[in-house]
Image (spheres, rainbow, N blue to C red):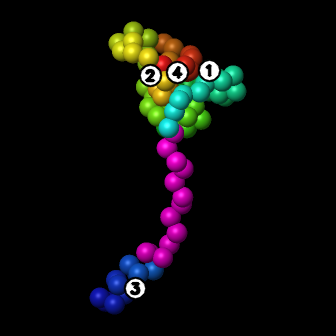
Amino acid sequence: MKHVVIVALALGACAQTPALEPLPTGPCRVDLALRMRWVGQEFKLSMRDDIQREANARTARVLRPDDAATMDLREDRLNIRLSEDGKINSLDCG
């Protein structure tokens, strides 16, 4: 039984792991194509990483109406602004 576990572990180590995409480095870039793809869609947290990567933003924050937010300008940050009904209202950098 001990040998079976060792063989299983050894075979598992040989499996290839998918290559990870490099993390975005900034500066953030939001263009018309990005806005057309995402604005108007109901926001789901699982979308955040995809939108952030497409915008090349190092960080992203989701802002709902009446959320408090710092006003500092960060060229590597994406703002995902939502409407009252939870849809993406706009995307911008800062």
Residue 63 pos. (x, y %): 44, 18
Indicate which disc, 4 or 2, sits on the residue closer to the N terminus: 2
Answer whether labels 1 and 3 touch (C-beta < 8 Å).
no
Up-down: is 25 above or below 14?
above
At label 2, the amino acid type is Arg
Which image quarter: residue 54? top right
Q: CA distance from mark 3 to mark 2?
A: 51 Å
Choose mark 1 or mark 2, whichever is in front.
2
Which residue, given by chain and number where applicable, does mark 3 sit on? 7
> Disc 1 to disc 2, how far (Cα)?
25 Å
Magenta run includes residue 14: yes
Which residue is the site of mark 2?
74
**What secondary structure is marked by label 3?**
helix
Badge 2, how many Cα within 10 Å: few under 14, some, many 20+? some
Q: Quadrant of the N terminus?
A: bottom left
| Position of 49 relative to 84 (above/below) | below
Task: From the viewer's perspective, tell me whether residue 3 is left or right of residue 56.
Answer: left
* Residue where numbered disc 4 is placed: 93
Distance of label 1 from label 4 (alpha carbons):
18 Å
**First to last magenta residue range:** 12-24
The amino acid sitting under disc 3 is: Val
Q: Is residue 16 visible?
A: yes
Q: Marks 4/2: CA distance?
A: 8 Å
Circles 4 and 2, Cβ within 8 Å, touching? The answer is: no
Amino acid type, callout 4: Cys
**Which tag, 1 or 2, sits closer to the chain's start?**
1
Q: Residue at x 48, y 28 (%)?
A: 76
User: Which mark's residue is nearer the viewer, 3 or 4?
Assistant: 4
